[in-house]
Image: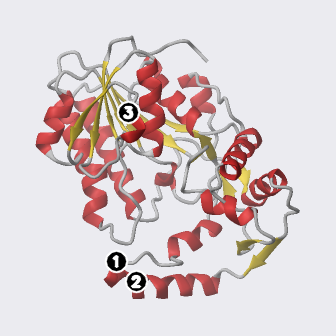
Amino acid sequence: MTDKRIPEGSRVLVTGATGYTGQVLVKKLVENGIKVRGIARSSSDLSPFSDMEVEWIRGEVYDEDTIKKGMAGIEYVFHVAAAFREAKSTEQDYRNVHVVSTQLLCKEALKQHEFKRFVHVSTMGVHGHIGNPPADENYPFGPGDSYQQTKCEAETWLAEFGPQNNLPFCIIRPCAIYGPGERRLLKLFRMAARSYFPILGKGKCWYHLVHVEDLVGGMLLGAVEEKALGEPFLIGSSEPIQLEEMAGIIAGTYGNKLKVVRLPIAPFFILGDLCEVVCRPFKIEPPIYRRRVAFYSKDRYFTTRKMREVLGYQPIYENEAGIIESAKWYRDNDWL
C-alpha cells in the first residue's frame, strides 16, 4: 500500500459520521491531523467523540440549509450516510438519505473553490445476486430492495453529474462490513455460537466481507489516488467466503463443533411475506422477512482486483483472521 494521504490540516466533511464505519473513519482522520466536520441528526449520540476535536453540524443530510453549513470551505467529502433498514423506513426515507443528499452535497461542492474529492460510499448490493461469478465493478446492476435501488440511483446520478460538471469524485462499494463492535452480522455470530447453525435452501451462500479498517483504508486512498477519479471500486477481502465456512471459523473460535442444518427455503419466504404484511401497518420490525430469507438464496462473489491494482489498496485483514478477531471481541464483551 502507498503512503498517499490527505494533507494534514485539510478540511473534511463526513456524513454518517456517528455510524459504525463513520466512527472509525472520523477517528482515523483526527489522528492524522485533519480538520473534521460531521453532520449528525439531533438524536445522534456524540459521546464516542468526546475526546476528539470534531465540529458538528446538527441536521438531516437531505436538508439544504444543513448541507450548505456543512460544506462551507470543505475540501474533501466522505459521504457515508445511509438510511436504516427498518420496518418504519419508507421509500422516501431511502431516497432522501441516499439520492437527495448526494445531489445536494455535489452541487454545493462545486461552489467550494478548493474542493478536491467527493468520496461516495455506495454498496456491493447495487449488483444484486451474482449469477456468473466473480463479478467486478462492471457487472450489471441488479438491486433487490429499496435500500439498494436508491443507492444505485444515487450512483447513476453521480456518474453522470460528475463528469458533466468537472466534479472530482470516486465511488466506493463496500462488501459486507464487519469488525469488533459491528451489529449487523452479530446475529450470525450468535447463531454459530449455538448447537445448530441453520442454512435455508441448498445454495452455496457465497459472501464477500470487508473489515471496517480495510474499508476505511480504501476510502482514504480513494480521496487522494489520481487513478481513482471517476471510478467505482469494490472494497473487500481478497477472496469471498461461503457462509458455512464462515460459521465454522466462528464456531471453532468458541470451541463449538459446527452442526449445520439445511432447511427448505420456500416455507420461510411465505412466512416472511406474512410477517411483513402483519407488521408493516404497525411499523413493527417483523421477526422474519423476505430480505433476510433471500440472503440464503443469493451469492455475493466478487473480485477486488481493481481495488488492489488500480486503487493500490492491499487488505490488512483476510477472512479468517478478521472473523476470529470479531468473534473474540463479541465473546469478551458479552455480546453473545
Residue 275 is left or right of residue 209, and the answer is left
Callout 1–callout 2 Cβ contact below 8 Å: yes
Q: Which residue is mark 3?
A: 50
Q: Which label number is shown at residue 99?
A: none
Q: Name the amino acid type tagged 2.
A: Cys
Residue 19 is left or right of residue 161, and the answer is right
Q: Quadrant of residue 67?
A: top left
Q: Which residue is mark 1?
A: 283
In the rendered view, tell whether residue 64 sits above or below residue 89: above
Q: Name the amino acid type tagged 1.
A: Lys
Q: Position of residue 19 (x, y in %)?
A: 42, 45
Q: Secondary structure at mark 2?
A: helix
Q: Please report the residue visible at 77 percent of the width from the left and 54 percent of the height from the top.
A: 250
As measured in the structure, the alpha-carbon distance from the residue carrying label 1 to the one carrying label 2 is: 6 Å
Q: How is the image coloured?
A: secondary structure
Q: Secondary structure at mark 1?
A: loop
